[in-house]
Image: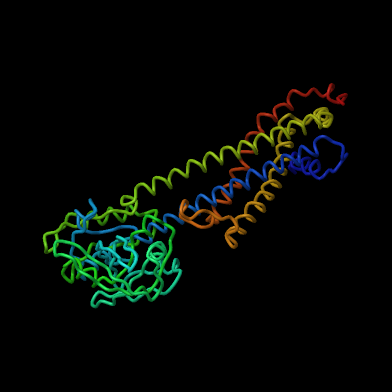
Amino acid sequence: MNLPLFIARRIYRDQGDKRKVSRPAIRIATVGVGIGLAVMLLSVSVVFGFKHTIRDKVIGFGSHIQVGDFMTLQGGEQYPIQMNDSMMEVLRKTAGVKHVQRFAVKQGILKTDSDFLGVAFKGVGPEFDSAFIHQNMVAGSIPKFSDTASGSQLLVSKTMADQLYLKVGDKLFAYFIDHNGVRTRRFTVAGIYQTNLSAYDKVTCFIDLYTARKLNGWEDDQASGAELAVNDFTKLQETEDILIEKVNRTVDRYGETYSSRTIQEINPGIFKWLDLLDMNVWIILALMMAVAGVTMVSGLLIIILERTTMIGVLKALGARNRTIRHTFLWFAAFIIGKGLLLGDVIGLGVILLQKFTGFVKLDAATYYVSTVPVEINIPLIILLNIATLIVSVFVLIAPSYLISHIHPARSMRYE
């Protein structure tokens, strides 16, 4: 039989005198651990949810990896690269790649009777993965994009629609100015999307790949590049390294050089900003662990002082200091366990409430999302519970040595 565990259970279950000082101390320690864990769960859930939501939005516009002309990826000007069936097949068969889609970009001006706006027309083909845009549609529908014929269908953002007073079904003209002069195309607004990622919503509208090629004066097998989605974001660099070996620095039949860049290299500012959020999480975790540890230390010291007579009796009966220390550590573990359960109920309750109701709102213009995003990560929740238990018990080891200074004869007369 485990004697320390047995005694700890009896002490924990003993309601005893309600006037005991240790009763409120135990409650405070339990609540302290619970609040600390709840705050940690909320912090991690919100930060991870925010990071992954913004990351997915950026990836939705540019995928994980872009393969294109070396000069295009190094600067802002568009240079064509050959993207025929054979090159697409090479990209599809690259280890770690899940999906490949071509795109072509053309700068132009949208013009209505009352206003105009400079935008980037992104041409996409029939293989375009529209799942991201579909999730963010606010009106209309996504047209069927083609690489063989012009559909004259336009997909604009809500930001553009509000600025130009557009609605689904409206017709408007687009003007394209380059070395060939000024060209005009008439488009029909097929749909309106809103991602709240202002850097893209302000400038990106979608047309078919065929139209973008013709406006650029490119051949049928040319494009600005290809966007590659990978199976595992954590292995993004590994996939990029394979592409560097297979594709980069090769030359197409027009003399253009292939190159590739990850979404992190294309948008370093956004991803560095997201990485800074990790520091906030570590600071919150450290503070909450400290709160839980301090409340438990104070609670244990009060319990030891109140149980001085019992400690003296146990010592007189031959119990070693180690046995008594283990008894109180077990007792503290019971309190911590109850606190963890309380923290899980509060933390997960608030997270689930936010996830399904979105009751906490944000300014989308500032934070890129209209509600606080949360993410439930079960392995991380379990890890936080285990880490809180271990840290809380660990900080109690030193205070538990106070037991070794209690003398049996004196303690049995202690009041």
User: In the image shown, does 297 or 368 lie closer to the viewer?
Assistant: 368
Position of residue 325 measured from the top left corner of the image (x, y, whole percent) = 72, 33
143 relative to 19 in the view: left or right: left
Up-down relation of residue 259 to residue 4 (above or below): below
Please give the name of the residue rendered at 39% of the width and 69% of the height, measured from the top-left corner: 166
Is 247 on the left-hand or right-hand side of 389?
Answer: left
Q: Kindly indicate the quadrant of the structure image that contains residue 235.
A: bottom left
Percent x, y of residue 294:
66, 34
Residue 374, percent across and down? 54, 55
Considering depth in this image, is 195 or 385 the residue closer to the camera? 195
Residue at left 16%, top 69%?
A: 219
Q: Is residue 110 visible?
A: yes
**Can residue 377 be seen?**
no
Total marks shown come to 0
**On-image quarter of the C terminus:** top right
Quadrant where the N terminus sits is top right
Residue name at image x 79 percent, y 40 percent:
7
Drawn side of residue 197 relative to residue 358, left or right: left
How is the rendered protein coloured? rainbow
**Left or right: residue 82 compared with residue 312:** left
Percent x, y of residue 42:
58, 50
